[in-house]
Amino acid sequence: MDSSADGRVVWITGAGSGIGRATAIEAATAGWRVALTGRRAPALDETVAAVQEAGGAALVLPGDATSDDVIRASLDRITATWGRLDALVLAAGLNAPERRWADHDPATFDEIVRVNLTGPAHLVTAALPLLRASHGVVVFVSSYAAWAFNPIAGVAYSASKAGLSALSRTLNAQEAASGVRSCHLCPGDVNTDFLGHRPQVPSDDARAAMLQPSDVARSVRFVLEAPTHVRFDELVVSPVSQT
Ligand SMILES: NC(=O)c1ccc[n+]([C@@H]2O[C@H](COP(=O)([O-])OP(=O)(O)OC[C@H]3O[C@@H](n4cnc5c(N)ncnc54)[C@H](OP(=O)(O)O)[C@@H]3O)[C@@H](O)[C@H]2O)c1
């Protein structure tokens, strides 16, 4: 572990797998203390074990990251345990195989928008006082589909991830004076469990050509470790094979 982060604290949602877990390990390796949220406690425990193996400290905050009660209780735990919050990495996300207007289901639409867009908006709102105090940084884990329109990403997914761009830009426009910075992070295809939401699940060969979670985690670390006068408004990271 290197100690360049000086005990700074990052709260990661979707921390039990994929990009969230890889980010927890990468941040812990860089000396960040990591708070971890997801609904599956055993998956979070596996992330904790990996963080500890990297020499890091983790706080487990299981629950639904879209619940205002969970958000409030988690911030209270972070404050009571570490007394500060320097960064958010909002990786909790959802898609569904039904992606076309022809098979549009309003309940599924609502759920995807709630997890991908409404939840992050509520979480940032609640965390803002702590982020102002630390001149903190927010990383919205959005999608390539929010940067380059992709008709097969899905109605709700495309709309919700595109909405993250607006959240991030308004945050930067309105909170610059308080030193809060936000990044709209747009990864291309990443080899994670998320691919199971696709109508056609990619083959092992296709997965091998994609970004790996650790590739995205290194990008997140780059954003987290920028000096406080530096902001990465948007970062697109994709595998060479991305079309
Ligand atoms: N994989 C890709 O190709 C790709 C590309 C671009 C962007 N992304 C984005 O990257 C983010 C991370 O996905 P991933 O690829 O790492 O896939 P993943 O391994 O499936 O991670 C998604 C995580 O979100 C968590 N989650 C879902 N709903 C939640 C909720 N209500 N509260 C708390 N946690 C919740 C899940 O944990 P629980 O089920 O335990 O809650 C899971 O750990 C997503 O936002 C996704 O849209 C992925």
Image (cartoon, grey):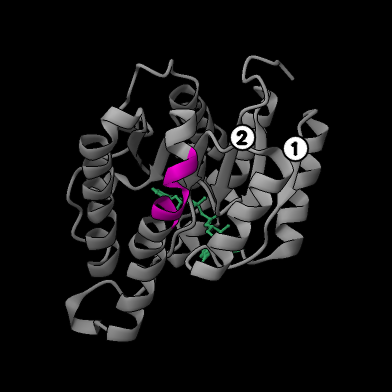
Q: Pointer 1: what residue?
A: 51
Res. 147 in view: yes
Residue found at x 70% / y 38%? 82
Pick the front one: 164 or 127: 127
Q: Pointer 2: what residue?
A: 9
Q: Mark 1: which amino acid?
A: Val
Sequence-first tag of 1 and 2 = 2
Count neighbours of disc 1 (C-alpha within 10 A) and say few if under 14, some if 14 to 19, many if 20 or more.
many
Count neighbours of disc 2 (C-alpha within 10 A) and say few if under 14, some if 14 to 19, many if 20 or more.
many
Q: Nearer the viewer, mark 1 or mark 2?
A: 2
Real-space CA distance between mark 1 and mark 2, rounded to the nearest whole angstrom = 14 Å
Q: Quadrant of residue 132?
A: top left
Q: Mark 2: which amino acid?
A: Val
Q: Residue 63 location, x and y as percent?
A: 62, 66
Pick the front one: 17 or 6: 6
**Secondary structure of the residue carrying numbered label 2:** strand
Residue found at x 34% / y 18%? 230
Res. 37 in view: no
Pick the front one: 54 or 5: 5
Residue 167 left/right relative to 139: left
Label disc, if present, on residue 199 of the rendered structure: none
Q: Quadrant of residue 112?
A: bottom left
In the image, which residues are magenta?
123-130
Q: Residue 7 location, x and y as percent?
A: 67, 25
Count of residue discs: 2
**Secondary structure of the residue carrying numbered label 1:** helix
Against 116, is 236 above or below? above
Residue 89 left/right relative to 60: left
Residue found at x 71% / y 58%? 43
Against 217, is 77 above or below? below
